[in-house]
Amino acid sequence: RVGLPIAPDSPNVISGIVKDPRGNPLPNVLVEVKDSSGNPVRAFKTNGVGQFASATALTNGVYTIEFEDPKEENKFDAIQFEAKSEIILPIEIISVDKREELRRELFN
């Protein structure tokens, strides 16, 4: 099992890990950070153990992170966060599998 990366030392730097519903890390997932206008400001892929980190800090503001599996086997909910000159703790992203999609269709 792979855990979260170490928290960044600098404010407004994002990091995290992407996993499937069984806790397996997902490598090569595209991570795209967009500003409040929907413009891409950072893009990178998860490494071999599903972790990602931005190399540079974001300016203060509201951002959305979107994830894309190039194999199209995993789907993800986008997340929104605010960068406000503080340390941003690493995030854990769990993909949505077919069972969860079915549950959402039936009960939402």
Image: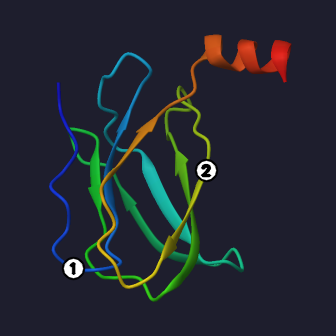
Q: Mark 1 or mark 2: which is in front?
A: 1
- Asked which secondary structure carries label 2, the reply is loop
Residue at the spot 28% in from the left edge and 41% down from the top edge = 50
User: In the picture shown, does residue 97 fall above or below 77?
Assistant: above
Q: Can you give x and y, in whole percent of width and height, for residue 54 in the image?
A: 31, 70
Residue at the spot 21% in from the left edge and 79% down from the top edge = 10
Nearest to N terminus: mark 1 or mark 2 = 1
Q: CA distance from mark 1 to mark 2?
A: 24 Å
For the N terminus, give its image quadrant.
Answer: top left
Q: Is residue 4 left or right of residue 20?
A: left
Q: Quadrant of residue 85?
A: bottom left
**Number of residue marks:** 2
Residue at the spot 41% in from the left edge and 82% down from the top edge = 58
Q: Quadrant of residue 19?
A: top left
Along the line of sight, the residue nearer the viewer: 82 or 43 = 82
Residue under numbered circle 1 = 10
Residue under numbered circle 2 = 78
The single residue placed furthest to the bottom in the displayed view is: 59
Amino acid type shown at disc 1 = Ser
Q: Which mark is residue 25?
A: none
Q: Is residue 22 left or right of residue 4?
A: right
For the C terminus, give its image quadrant.
Answer: top right
Q: Can you give x and y, in whole percent of width and height, for residue 3 in the image?
A: 19, 37
Amino acid type shown at disc 2 = Ala
Q: Can you give x and y, in whole percent of width and height, for residue 51 in the image?
A: 26, 47
- Asked which secondary structure carries label 1, the reply is loop
Q: Is residue 81 left or right of residue 103?
A: left
Q: Can you give x and y, in whole percent of width and height, for residue 35 in the image?
A: 60, 78
